[in-house]
Image (cartoon, rainbow, N blue to C red):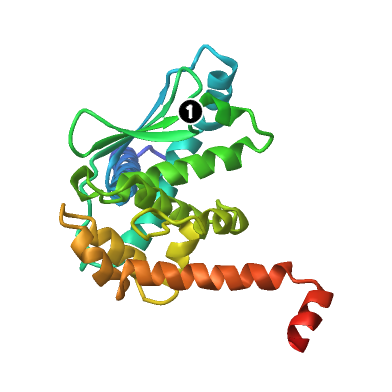
Amino acid sequence: MEEPLLHDPSSSSSSSSSSSVSSPSSTTIIIRLSTIIAVAAISLWANYEASKGFEISIVNAAAGSLAGRRFNLMFVSNGRAARMVHHASQFVEHELYPSNLYPRKPVNRVTLRMASHNLTTTVSLTSGRGPADFVINLSPSLMSPSDTYAALASAVQRGIARVWLWDGGGTAPEPLLDAMVDYLAMIAGFASPTHVITDAVSQEPNGTCWSGEFLRHCDGRRQEFIARLNGAMRGRSWELMVDEALGSSVRRMCEGYRSSIGQLRESSDATPELVELRQVI
């Protein structure tokens, strides 16, 4: 007669022990994986913040108006405004500081502020609380154009350009700074060269003709010209270094540029009959 099967206590104990061991082991693995993912995410965010190089703040002083609500909905709530500042800064920094040979202007914080009322210009720059803090003021009128995104992107591009430009300790002439802002906006795709050419022909009393198109003309003649020019404006004696950045006299370069623009206009304005008459003469 066969003996009845008896339950082995040691076997049950071993199985229970094995189960209890495997359960904490799985939990430990999950915790470790979660920790690794969290650390990786924090590292990526830290690298992103470090790549920006400065703190970005967005302020909407027109929150109660239609323009303010549009700004908040289209650019603030989704982080688009901050990304605009970051991307514009990357572009400008690459043009003005292509290498360590060009000392960078200290920038710790940039505040993009939608003003509470329309400004005389679409964008302006004011100082923040510290010497390396800047406020880019935007006019609510920017929220009116049909292509609001392009209008705001252009304004941000110009504002950021002004942030990164040296200004000779406040002694650099506004026409020169405006021309550099125009040039940086132009090569970023936010300006009409035709309009700038018209402005370029007007000459300043000191013989210069600063404009975005003139600076593009100069940049085509000398590598890293715009970076050299910006570096020349780092100190108060910037006037002595501008000619060096150009590699020629500013007045001479301007005269040559004005002459070439005049010939270009003369050629573009000529009718076939006028061209034939000139050839006869």
Q: Is residue 178 above or below residue 218?
A: above
| 275 sits to left or right of 249 | right
Q: Residue at x 52, y 71 (%)?
A: 259
Position of residue 172 measured from the top left corner of the image (x, y, whole percent): 26, 49
Q: Is residue 239 above or below residue 158?
A: below
Q: Which element carries disc 1, helix, strand or loop?
A: loop
Tell me the amino acid under the disc marked 1: Thr
Q: Is residue 27 above or below residue 200?
A: above
As drawn, the residue found furthest toward the right would be 273
Q: Residue at x 58, y 55 (%)?
A: 198
Q: In this view of the protein, which residue sits in the foreground, 135 or 270?
A: 270
* Circle count: 1
Q: In this view of the protein, which residue sits in the foreground, 21 or 37?
A: 37
Quarter of image, res 100: bottom left
| 61 sits to left or right of 144 | left
Q: In this view of the protein, which residue sits in the foreground, 154 or 80?
A: 154
As drawn, the residue found furthest toward the top would be 64
The answer to whether one can see residue 2 in this image is no
Q: Is residue 136 above or below residue 37?
A: above
Disc 1 crowd, CA 10 A, few/some/many (<14, 14-19, 20+): few
Quarter of image, res 189: bottom right
The answer to whether one can see residue 279 in this image is yes
Position of residue 65 measured from the top left corner of the image (x, y, whole percent): 55, 14
Position of residue 153 measured from the top left corner of the image (x, y, whole percent): 52, 42
Q: Residue at x 31, y 40 (%)?
A: 31
Residue receiving disc 1: 120
Q: Quadrant of the C terminus?
A: bottom right
As drawn, the residue found furthest toward the bottom would be 280
Q: Residue at x 18, y 46 (%)?
A: 169
